[in-house]
Every structure is written in C-alpha cells, then in structure tokens.
Amino acid sequence: MAEKGAKRSSEEGSFELCEVCRVNHAHGRRHRYFPSHLRAVSALLSRFRAKLSDLRFFLRHPSPLCSKQAHINRL
C-alpha cells in the first residue's frame, strides 16, 4: 500500500505525516512495518469491509420508502 504523506522541513530534519496513523514521524519507509501502523491499516480495511458488506446488503434487499419518509431519500 502506497503511503501518502506530506514532507515538512524543520530544523531537526524532515518529518512525514502518515495519513493512516495520523502521526508525524521521521522513520521513512520503514514506518510501514511498525506494529502500530499495521494495526491502523488493519482497522481501516476492516471498517471499509464492513461498509461494503452493508452496501451489498442494501443493494440486494431494497426497501421502498413510504410517502412520509420520502424526504429521507435525497436523490
């Protein structure tokens, strides 16, 4: 997984922001293999997988809205 980051220069050196962990670090590419980063990636993917399964369920089992709830459907 490609890590997106914005490099910032400072007096100590360059820091990189990991958008997955939301942590500034100066570890370079080896940050991807840290246990905290791996846990963050795993949590991110599991949340995404749950959202996809919910979407699949609602696409397979559509339910019509009654006229009182028509304002909920904002297409």
Image (cartoon, rainbow, N blue to C red):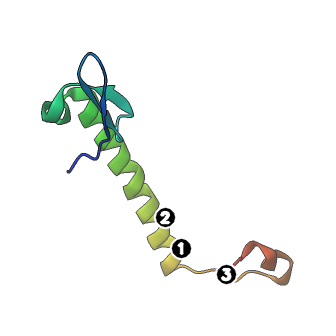
| Residue identifier under label 2 | 54
Upstream in the sequence, badge 2 or badge 3?
2
* Front in this rendered view, residue 18 or 64: 18
Type of the residue with mark 1? Phe
Judge from the rendering whether residue 38 lies leftward or rightward of residue 62; answer left or right.
Answer: left
The answer to whether 26 appears left or right of 67 in the picture is left
Q: Are marks 1 and 3 in contact (CB under 8 Å)?
A: no
Q: Where 26 sits versus 43, above or below?
A: above
- Residue at (58% x, 81% y) in the render: 62
Q: Which mark is residue 75?
A: 3
56 left or right, relative to 13: right
> Is residue 52 placed above or below 44 in the rendered structure?
below
Quadrant housing residue 34? top left
In space, the residues marked 2 and 3 are separated at their CA atoms by: 19 Å
Question: Residue at 35% across / 34% down in the picture?
Answer: 21
Could you give the CA–CA distance between mark 2 and mark 1, rounded to whole angstroms?
A: 6 Å
> For numbered disc 1, what is the local secondary structure?
helix
| Secondary structure of the residue carrying numbered label 2 | helix
**Could you give the CA–CA distance between mark 1 and mark 3, rounded to whole angstroms?**
16 Å
Residue 28 image point, x, y percent: 17, 31
Rendered image quadrant of residue 26:
top left
For the point 80% across and 82% down, the residue is 66
State if disc 1 and disc 2 touch (CB < 8 Å).
Answer: yes
Label ID, residue 74: none
Closer to us: 70 or 20: 20
Name the residue that disc number 1 marks.
58
Closer to the N terminus: mark 1 or mark 3? Answer: 1
- Which of discs 1 and 3 lies nearer the camera? The answer is 3
Q: Pick the residue in front: 16 or 41.
A: 16
Q: Name the spot of residue 18 as percent of width and height, x first.
A: 31, 37
Residue 43: percent from left, percent from top: 36, 42
